[in-house]
Amino acid sequence: MVLRITLATLATCMFLGNANAGPGWYGSYDEARQASEQQGVPLLVHFHASYCGPCRQMNSVVFSQADIQHKLRDGIAAVEIDIDHRRDLTEQFGVQTVPCDFIVLPRQAPELLNAGFKSAAAYRDLLRNVVARGAQIPKTKIEIPIIVDKAPLEPSEPVLGLEGFCPVELIKNRKWIAGQGQLTAEDRGIVYRFSSATAQAEFKRDPRKFTPQNLGCDPVTLYVDQQAISGQIKFGAFFDNQLFLFETPENRTTFKDNPLKYGRIRHALKVDDLTSRRIQ
């Protein structure tokens, strides 16, 4: 099924927030945050994406159940956030994969409760745990921060991007040219090497233009297994002028059969999440 959404409709949805919130959810993050403060209950934030298979499955078999819809409003202020509509919250919470759930308690940073699909029984247990923790909150008005600054984790040693090949030559000219060890630049904890000072300068002006998607992780493995496994350059593929790397040729073939399915989802990964080759 192909969805056709006009720019006006999309803009309206983004302005209103979670306009299509299902039963049990608050209509927007701000509404849920305000309810959390006024009622003195935990704020539960569920991140999802419209093109995420496990997210759609949870909507179908978990959030459709009446008792779960009731529990979402019983001692909890819950909201679901589409990562494409609220990228600011996605970044502030440090979302790495969808679906996932965070709890926010007074004077505490958001805490990740769950990443990946949960059955109805498992999600009931999650909600009971949230309510139990909320019962320990002093019954006074609390303040939930709108913006949460999370210091990024520093890797113990740098990761070498594209196995030392120049990303600018690769993206612009589709050429695998080895970079020089003295010509480097870093983006999101990954070090890239360049074939020339000109390429290095061009990269620094717009790094994301030349780096692999998902920090070089295999998008099929990310989608299916929700694991951040680094792809190999020999199994690379371009889609929409963006480079994707795969750990196996089979995954590359799977991606090419349906690139929109695996290529649209963006995971807020950190370098320490990767299984990657380190600089020797």
Image: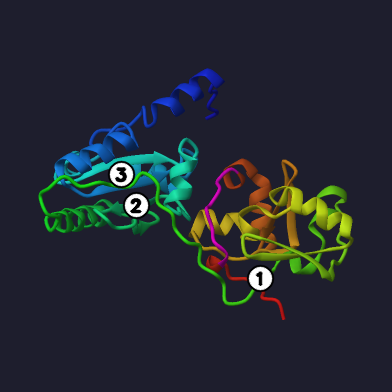
User: Real-space Cα distance between discs 2 and 3?
Assistant: 17 Å
Q: Position of residue 260 (x, y in %)?
A: 61, 41
Q: Nearer the viewer, residue 189 or 123?
A: 189
Q: Is residue 188 left or right of residue 20?
A: right
Q: Nearer the viewer, residue 184 or 10?
A: 184
Q: Position of residue 30 (x, y in %)?
A: 32, 35
**Front disc: 2 or 3:** 2
- The residue type indicated by label 2 comes to Asp
Residue matched to label 1: 159
Q: Quadrant of residue 94?
A: bottom left
Q: Is residue 268 left or right of residue 185?
A: left
Tag of residue 56: none
Q: Quadrant of residue 61?
A: top left
Magenta residue span: 264-271
Query: Which residue is drawn at the image coordinates 34% and 40% (left, top)?
Result: 80
Q: Is residue 8 left or right of residue 32?
A: right
Query: Which residue is drawn at the image coordinates 65% and 50% (left, top)?
Result: 255
Label 2 sits on a secondary structure element that is strand
Query: Label 1 crowding class (10 Å Cα cut-off): few <14, some 14-19, many 20+?
Result: many
In the displayed structure, 66 sits above or below 194; it is above
Report the magenta stretch's main SS. loop
Q: Position of residue 182 (x, y in %)?
A: 83, 71
Residue matched to label 3: 61
Q: Nearer the viewer, residue 266 or 139?
A: 139
- The residue type indicated by label 3 comes to Val
Residue matched to label 2: 101
